Each structure stands twice: as C-alpha cells, then as structure tokens.
Amino acid sequence: MTGPYFPFIILPQEFLVLLKTNLPSSPIPKQIIEILNGNKAFSRVLEVSLSEFSDGLNLEKAIKTLGWPSFKERMASLLIYKVVYGDYPTKSHIRLIEDIKNFETRFRDHSVTGSSRLFLLGLYLKLANMELQIAEGDFLKEIILSDEINSLLKISQGRSEKIDWLLIVIYHLNLFLGFEVFSKHLRNNISFEEVFNLLSHDQREILGRNLLGYGASIQEQDFFLYEKI
C-alpha cells in the first residue's frame, strides 16, 4: 500500500491544549501560565528562551510583552530548533516558523476567529516533513498542500472550526480522485459518504491511517467520534 504518510509526532501536551483552545488575540497571561504549569520543565525552557521579552523577570511578563500570536510562534520555534539541533535554544528563532505563519495566513479565511488550528496543522506538517526527510531521505515524500486545495475550499465558501481535519480530508480526496472529479462533486453538493465510497480499499486505508496519525499527534479523537467537523 503506497501513498502519503502522516507520521506520529510527539508534541508537548500543554502546547497542544493551547493551540486547540480558541483564545482571544489578547488572552489573560495567567490563563496561559496555568496550562503551561502542567509541564514545569517546558515552562522553564520558555522562561529562559524568552527572557529578553520579560526584562529577566518571569514568563507572565514575556506573554504580556509578546501577545498570544507572537508567543505561540516563539514556542513553536523552540520545538523546531530542538528537532534540528537536538536541544532547546537559549533564545527563540522566529525565522524557523515563517513557513508556518504563511500557511496560517493562506487558509485563514476558511477558519473561525480565535482558532489556532491552522497554526497547529502547519507545525505538524513541518515536523512531519522533517521526520520523513530524515527517515526516507527523499524530498518527494513531503506532504504538500497544493494551490488546488485553496480552490476547493472556495467552492464551499464556509468557515470550519476544525479546519485542520477538513484540510487533511480534502488533501487526500483531491489526491485520490483528482481535482476535476472532486471539485465537480463539491459543486454538486455530493455528500462525504458518497465521495468516500468512490475510493478504493487501499485509498480508504491510507486516509484512515493518516487521520489516526494526525489525531494521535495532537491527542484528539473528535474526527472519529462526531459526524460534523
């Protein structure tokens, strides 16, 4: 069975909780601190690496200075740095997540306000592609969401609370059925069940495997428990 592969990626649980929670653009820093305190070691890493934004004081001061959007970006840069160099840095490197920011901007019109789901998926895809390159030694194994995905989303003209799950499903259906066939089904409002039935057994296996891989990585089972995403 060949096809795209979405590997299991380990991410700090506290970071996942924050990215899966719809937070206002300026949340109360103490709310973020309460979640991060579940992982004292990671909180300490953040405190050290972001000390330049807190005047050497504490993490709450850094959050107030940066604001939630910039704070989450710098948290993500620490995780990527660790994967690349093997340890956490003493200073955040925002350049490491420019592609994730671009990914978030690219699909923002199809997500709900306050959601960090696009950023979460962008981070997952970056780390997944890094792992695939290391394991396979082949850049052709990369998971890339083509411009066709944007066109398919425009057909629906809606916003999704779980845009990450929706993008993964659309990515697979477009890959398996082809843009012309899949876009025609979308314009004709064909149900997901009918489209799913067009897939071969192997294609269904690949889609299921990759949904499980992503779900396990972000510690979420909603796609498998609820009909509406």
Image: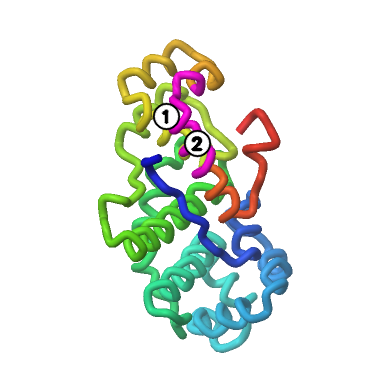
Let me know if residue 197 is in the magenta part. Answer: yes
Quadrant of residue 13 within the rendered picture: bottom right
Mark 1: give few (<14), some (14-19) or many (20+) Cα within 10 Å. many
Q: Earlier in the sequence, mark 1 or mark 2?
A: 1
Which residue does the image show at 32% across and 59% down from the upper left? 136
Residue with the mark numbered 1: 173
Let me know if residue 200 is in the magenta part. Answer: yes
Badge 1 element? helix
Q: Which residues are magenta?
A: 196-210
Badge 2 element? helix
| Gap between marks 1 and 2 measured at Cα | 13 Å
* Vertical position of residue 98 compared to residue 155: above or below: below
Q: Position of residue 87 (x, y in %)?
A: 46, 82
Q: Position of residue 103 (x, y in %)?
A: 38, 49
- Give the farthest residue toward the top: 188
* Image side of residue 174 versus residue 45, left or right: left
| Amino acid at the residue labelled 2 | Glu
| Amino acid at the residue labelled 1 | Leu
Q: Position of residue 133 (x, y in %)?
A: 32, 61
Residue with the mark numbered 2: 205
* Image side of residue 181 versus residue 19, left or right: left
